[in-house]
Image (spheres, rainbow, N blue to C red):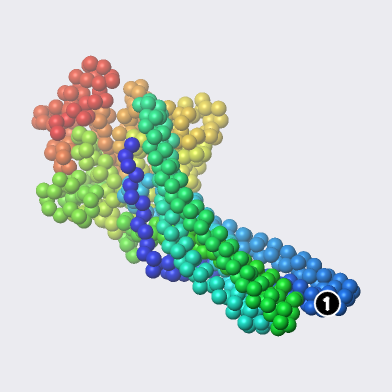
Amino acid sequence: MSEPQDDDPIAPAHYDWTLFVRLLRYLRPHKAMVAAAFLLILAMAALDLVGPYLTKVAIDGPIARGDGEGLLTIAGLFLATLLVAYGVRFAQTYLMQMTGQKIMLDMRREIFSHLQKLHVAYFDKNPVGRLMTRVTTDVDAVNELFTSGVVTVFGDLFTLFGIMGVMLALDWRLALVTFSVIPLFFLVTNWFRKGARQSFRETRRWVARINAFLQENLTGMSVVQLFRREARNEAAFATINRNHADANMTAIFYYAVFYPAIELLAALAIGLILLYGGSGVLRGAITLGALVAFIQYSERFWRPISDLSEKFNIVQAAMASSERIFLLLDTAPAVTARPEPTRLAEVSGRVAFEGVWFSYAGDKVSADDDPQWVLRDIAFSAPPGRSVALVGATGAGKTSIISLLTRFYDVQRGRVTLDGVDVRDLDPATMRRALALVLQDVYLFSGTIASNIRLGSDISEERVRAAARAVHAHRFIEALPQGYETEVRERGSTLSVGQKQLLSFARALAHDPRVLILDEATSSVDTETEQLIQDALRTLLRGRTAIVIAHRLSTIQNVDEILVMHKGRIRERGTHAELLAVRGLYWRLYQLQYKDQEMGAGAGLVSASGLPG
């Protein structure tokens, strides 16, 4: 297995505030709920100040005087405060959790929508597992920021400043003694911030690699078992898993140091209060009730500070995740519609390639002799209703031509046109409605047989069945337990390769395209089924433009023109009979395939790659 690719680049530290501001915009649609939660947090902060003050009043008043009735009144007030605080905290937590769920809903919808707009080349370079991590784990981390971070931070700050104000009002000297340990807190926090941020990044990075590795190997499990790679894959996974565990251990180290350090500072503050305040009580400078209240306020003073530290951890995790989310959302699609795209009233299906040069390296290639060119000066046309076949060795550039026509990629030189209009001037969604693509590797989605033919389009049941009959798929579909309503398992695992290809054929024909593209569409179909498909094609391709890629030359003998490709160029063109008469590359390929057919059906699969390189 190949080494995982580098993960998304890390944003610079000064980018934090920009990220934070961008995250806050997700609160705007829910500002009423956030405002209500904010008010409840203010009420909670005020209620937190009441308990210690009631303790002071009770010690210095009823307890000092021996007034049992007054003490009962204060105890009743204390209990009422606790009950109100419980209700306020419940309402605030419920509102923020609900808001967080709605924000996750919005964010995941935005990410998924953006992923569907990205160009195909982006998915060639980014593993599916990594992108899944953006939608799942990273969004969860950002959710924690909203439910337990952004708004509740203000509550902790109000509680903190409220306690500081009350302590200063009770005795400013004793308050300053308590605050004397705050600089140490900032030193510890700064050390923790730098280390924790990096550890969060590393953890997220290895989570993405674990997901990518799992997705790749679970999808290809049949190949893994067939080639007995279980032990090697287990070793590779163990390495990735160990690196993830090491990253987590680094984070645990910072936690293990930070929280005890905060507890130590809180204990130091209480010790100073007892030392200084106790002597004040002995001198009569401060009451015993005030000293006890100071100790309680000190404990509550460090609680929001500790909470802020925890919120800081949440913020750090959210920042590390939001970096990756926004880097994904900021990735602009390379294939987009013009601001004012050309609109074709009706597509007739004329396809033309005019001096096309193409490289997957993009604009980095300029010299004509650069080996990175996949296509070189490709020029041909397919009039409406005509068929063109592309043949050649693997790597000759046949599939790249299809990718340019469907505008999965854009050309570097020349142009590809549909009805005389450059495909770059057309809206991709509108243009692709006129195209239908049948690939060798058929992808079926979860759902029913019928839904896999419709693919969400408004196609009637009669039309679905007509398309299936036309490609001779109706017979095997009707034999399934629920017919057209039979559930398709993941990637159509319960169907044969030939059946999946027939469904893909029915899918394309049901959408009634003006241009039908077949990329090795019959390579995995047995001879009998292939003959049935050929019969159907002669009827169904009438009036449609067809671009056909095939290794089996028997499937393209009746097309209007055959293009023989070699190293990114069109070397020969003509009909089947004309190309045989030339006795060139096509003739050699035909001879190899004819001999292979005589030697056995299995050897015929190799003949396409037998074209001289």
Is 121 located above or below residue 315 in the figure? above
Give the side of residue 547 with respect to residue 487, left or right.
left
Quarter of the rendering containing residue 295: bottom right
Is 386 located above or below residue 161 in the figure? above
Residue sitting farthest toward the top: 599
Nearest to the observer: residue 585 or residue 354: 585
Horizontal and vertical percent for residue 111? 45, 56
Quarter of the rendering containing residue 309: bottom right
**Residue, x 79% and y 75% (percent of image)?**
59
Is 17 located above or below residue 126 in the figure? below
Q: Is residue 438 visible?
A: yes
Q: Please, what secondary structure does the residue beneath circle 1 have?
A: helix
Query: Badge 1 is on which residue?
Result: 64
Horizontal and vertical percent for residue 172? 63, 83
Q: Amino acid at mark 1?
A: Ala
**Residue, x 16% and y 23% (percent of image)?**
591
Numbered marks: total:
1
**Residue, x 35% and y 23% (percent of image)?**
526
**Residue, x 36% and y 35% (percent of image)?**
441
Quarter of the rendering containing residue 396: top left
Rendered-image quadrant of the C terminus? top left
Horizontal and vertical percent for residue 200? 45, 55
Mark 1 crowdedness (10 Å alpha carbons): few <14, some 14-19, many ≥20: few
Rendered-image quadrant of the N terminus? top left
Horizontal and vertical percent for residue 213? 40, 41
Q: Is residue 329 visible?
A: no
